[in-house]
Amino acid sequence: MTNPEMAGAAALLLRLALALMFFAHAWLKIAVFTPAGTVKYFESLGVPGFLAYLTIAAEIGGGALLLFGVGTRWVAIALIPLILGTIYLVHGKNGWLFSNKDGGWEYPAFWAVALAALALLGDGTAALGPMVGLNW
């Protein structure tokens, strides 16, 4: 049985967890791999290097919008292709389990489903978007 009174809290928890994960992945690309290293990695995958910068920007910008609950549904939907791209370009060839060498596609697939669930749930509790009229 679903408890509709708790859906807002559930969306908030999911929104915050996803924001944290996007920030963590952006930080990894900036602080550990460096932007230049991330560009080289993207190019090694056959992807134009400038997409590394767009990916970092999407992770930071999307994470911030999710954190504050601004345009949550649209942001979650917009971030799904980013995550599916990691399955297609990086993790898909490594098998299902993320514990496989170089990480399988289990984790990014779950991340994409979590984004889809958030898009269905909406902003949730404590979202700033609806409070300031930014409820796209």
Image (cartoon, rainbow, N blue to C red):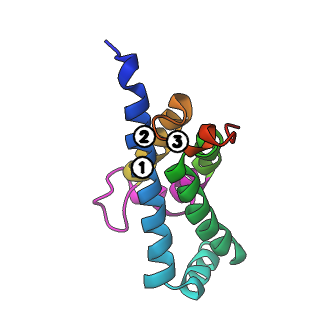
Tags 3 and 2 touching, CB below 8 Å = yes
Tags 2 and 1 touching, CB below 8 Å = yes
- Which residue is at 62% across, 37% downward? 130
Please check the rendered image and state whether residue 33 is part of the magenta-colored stretch, yes or no. Answer: no
Locate the C terminus and report the quarter of the image it occupies.
top right
Name the one closer to the observer, 32 or 70. Answer: 70
Snapshot quadrant of residue 131: top right
Instruction: List x then y, in percent, for residue 44.
Output: 59, 78
Instruction: List x then y, in percent, for residue 121.
Output: 50, 29
Classify mark 2: helix, strand or loop.
Answer: helix
- Which residue is at 36% across, 62% downward? 103
What's the magenta region? 82-104
Real-space Cα distance between discs 3 and 2?
8 Å
Snapshot quadrant of residue 55: bottom right
Classify mark 3: helix, strand or loop.
Answer: loop
Q: Which mark is residue 127?
A: 3
Is residue 46 at all visible to an observer of this figure? no
